[in-house]
Amino acid sequence: MEAVQPSLAEVAALVGNPARANMLTALLDGRALTATELAYAAGVAPQTASGHLARLATGGLLGVEKQGRHRYYRLASLAVVQLMESIMQVASVADVKRPAVGPRDAALRTARTCYDHLAGRLGVALADALGEGGRIELSTDAGLVTDAGIAFFDRIGIDLGALNAPHGGRPARVLCRPCLDWSERRPHLAGGIGAALCAHSFARDWIRRLPGTRAVAVTPKGQRVFREQFGARLS
């Protein structure tokens, strides 16, 4: 039997529930979480969380992986990530009476992960610097890495050839594309190179995760590298 595709209204209803919206938001950093962890993120009882998770999985918004006694949930696709970021952007414009931004929100706006790449002021600053340096070119919905960019990424330890290779029979993902930042409302860098840059920044201790949030902190080493090697203007 052919799978029934959820309608626009059904998807909107799934995302529109506050508990489910909090669960989806908690998964935006790309990690897989258990039902218990997602219940805590949503502020609901575990039994209530199970019903919400079942609906999200049936609706195609969540993928489920089983390891031993545990089931891990993650966002089903990059399309779901883009959906959530777009809704957050619209909400930030529409919510004209929102309260003053608190410390946690300030940290998210400064630097955070957007699924598997960097966002916030840090992500936008890096995209700007790479563009101004002639290393990438971003249009409204596409991007490319220039020859100068290939040499630059190779110099800092990112092999673009490996990113372009198919994995497990699947074609390689889009290498370079813009992703509209919901807080800055300007593009940051996504695609394979955006994910590689994020992972490389964690591995080299340029950035570190802050507990309990998608926000990341830029280390003193990262401040120096982003300023001197990338040419990024970090406030």
Image (cartoon, rainbow, N blue to C red):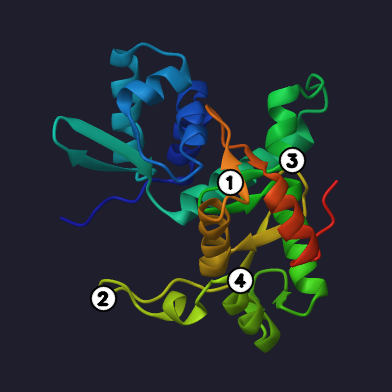
Tag 3, which secondary structure? helix
Name the residue nearer the viewer: 224 or 34: 224
What is the distance, in whole Å, between disc 1 and disc 4 at their CAs?
20 Å
Image mark for residue 41: none
Image mark for residue 110: 3
The answer to whether residue 198 is left or right of residue 133 is left
Image mark for residue 113: 1
Q: Give the vertical position of 50 relative to 216 (above or below).
A: above
Which comes sooner in the sequence, label 1 or label 4?
A: 1
What is the distance, in whole Å, between disc 3 and disc 1 at their CAs?
11 Å
Residue 51 visible here? no
Q: Give the mark toward the camera: 4 or 2.
A: 4
How many discs appear? 4
What is the distance, in whole Å, between disc 3 and disc 4 at their CAs?
23 Å
Q: Name the residue under label 2.
A: 169
The percent coordinates of residue 230 (x first, y second) are 75, 66
| Three-letter code, disc 4 | Ile
| Three-letter code, disc 1 | Thr
Name the residue nearer the viewer: 27 or 218: 218
Q: Give the vertical position of 14 relative to 146 (above or below).
A: above
The percent coordinates of residue 13 (x first, y second) are 47, 32
Q: Give the mark toward the camera: 3 or 4.
A: 4
The percent coordinates of residue 92 (x first, y second) are 74, 35
| Three-letter code, disc 3 | Thr
The percent coordinates of residue 4 (x first, y second) are 28, 50
Q: Give the mark toward the camera: 1 or 4.
A: 4
Q: Name the residue under label 4.
A: 156
